[in-house]
Image: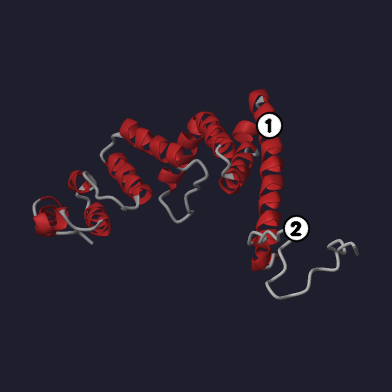
Amino acid sequence: MRISSAFVVMLAVLATAVPGLRAGTGADQLEAARSLYMAAAYEEALAALTSLPDGVDVDQADKFRALCQLALNRTKDAQQTLERLATRRPMLTLDESEAPKLIAMFRDARARVLPAAAKTMYQDAKGSYEQGDFSAASGQFGDLLSLLAEKELAGQAAFSDMKIVAEGFLKLATQQLAVQRAGSFASASQPASTNQPAVPIPASQPAPTGQPASRNQPAASTP
C-alpha cells in the first residue's frame, strides 16, 4: 500500500519540529523513528534518532539507524553503526525476525570487532577481580569464556592463552566467593552476646564492712 506524502510529512514534523516529542522519552523517539522508517522517511528517521535522552534503548536505536542507512545506500555508515553496536554488546545476536541483510551485516561487523572486544572484556574482568568484586569478575570471566569459544576466536593461539588465564581467574573468583559466603554465614550464625566485650573481674575485692574476713586471709596469731 502506498503511503501518502502528507503522512510522511506529518511524521517528520512530529519527530523533528514538535518540542514535546524532542524532549519526550526515549521510547517516544524510538517509536517516531520506527514509524518514519516504515513510511520510508529515512532521513527524518535518522534525525529522530539524534540527541537521544538517557535511558533509551541504544541497541534498538542503532538497529533502526543501520536500517535507515542501508535504505539510503550508506553502506559504510551502516557498517560503522553495527560495529559500534557489536563492540558495546559483543554477546549480542540478532533475532531471526530482523531483516536478513541487517543480520548478515551484523554478523560480519561482529566478527571484525570480536578480537578487540575480547581483550576489553578480559581487562574489565581482571579489574573487577583485583578490586575484590568477585561476583562481577565471575560473571565477566564466564562471558569472556563463552565469547572465546566462538569459531572466530577459538582457533587463534593468542586467544587460546587468554582462555587458559581466564579459566584460572574464574576458578579463583569462585573460590573467593565461597570463602566470603562461608564467612558471612559464620558471622550470621554466632549469638549476639559473643560479640560483646567481656567485663573484667578483679582478682580480689575487700570484704564488705561488718562481714567476716575471707577464709583465704591468714588467721591472726594467738598471743
Farthest residue, direction front = 223
Task: Give 28 or 210, whichever is nearer the viewer.
Answer: 210
Residue 101: percent from the left, percent from the top? 41, 44
| Circle 1: residue type | Val
Task: Give 187 or 90, whichever is nearer the viewer.
Answer: 187
Q: Kindly tell me whether residue 105 is visible in this rendering.
A: no
CA gap between label 1 and label 2 equals: 60 Å
**Nearer the viewer's eye, disc 1 or disc 2?**
2
Farthest residue, direction bottom = 210
| Label 2 sits on residue | 203
Quadrant of image for the C terminus: bottom right
Residue 47: percent from the left, percent from the top? 18, 45
| Circle 2: residue type | Ala
Task: Give 110 or 57, whichever is nearer the viewer.
Answer: 57
Q: Earlier in the sequence, mark 1 or mark 2?
A: 1
Location of residue 63 with respect to 125 vertically, above or below: below
Mark 1: give few (<14), some (14-19) or many (20+) Cα within 10 Å: some
Give left or right: position of 60 versus 140: left
Mark 2: give few (<14), some (14-19) or many (20+) Cα within 10 Å: few
| Label 1 sits on residue | 165
Give left or right: position of 11 versus 206: left
Which dot marks residue 118?
none
Task: Give 112 or 19, whichever is nearer the viewer.
Answer: 19
At a point 31% along the width and 33% down the height, the residue shown is 77
At a point 32% along the width and 40% down the height, the residue shown is 70
Give left or right: position of 149 versus 89: right
